[in-house]
Amino acid sequence: MTEVDQEPCRLRTLCRNDVAHVQRCIGCGCISVHMGAFTVRLDNTGLEALWAVLGDAAAVLHAQKRAELPVQPRGHA
């Protein structure tokens, strides 16, 4: 619900996959991120901050995974 007029949000899907469903209210602009039974409501700035921290976390995990991989010896020429 919007804080100003207390009417229910009119949600439009921005994108979805098997993990999350992201919607935006046409009236108040609030962003809703649904993951199973869990929903987070954010403004545009909050969504961008969440996107940045998730991207950073994914980059760290990929770097750690690469560091854990055994180094393959190169063949002798």
Image: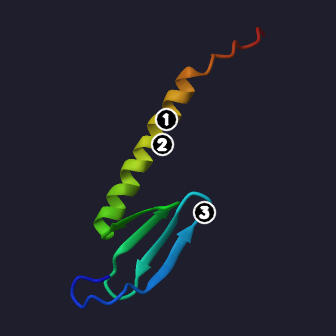
Q: Quadrant of the N terminus?
A: bottom left
Residue occupying the point 35% across, 68% down: 41
- Badge 3 marks a residue whose secondary structure is loop
Q: Residues within 10 Å of mark 2 (few under 14, many from 20)?
A: few
Q: Residue furthest front?
A: 37
Q: Is residue 75 above or below residue 46?
A: above
N-terminal-most mark, 1 or 3? 3
Instruction: State whether residue 74 is above or below residue 12.
Output: above
- Looking at the picture, how far across and down is residue 56, in whole percent? 40, 44
Outermost residue toward the left in this view: 4
Task: Point out residue 51 in the picture as x, y percentages from the top left corner.
Answer: 40, 56
Rounded to the nearest whole Å, what is the CA distance between mark 2 and mark 1? 5 Å
Check if mark 1's residue and mark 3's residue have beta carbons within 8 Å.
no
Q: Which mark is residue 17?
A: 3
Circle 1: residue type: Leu
Distance, label 1 to label 3, CA atoms, is 21 Å
The circle drawn on residue 61 is 1
State which quarter of the image contains the C terminus. top right
Residue found at x 49% / y 28% = 64
Q: Which residue is mark 2?
A: 58
Q: Identify the residue shown where x is 36% and y is 86%.
A: 8
Q: Residues under labels 3 and 2: Cα distance?
A: 17 Å
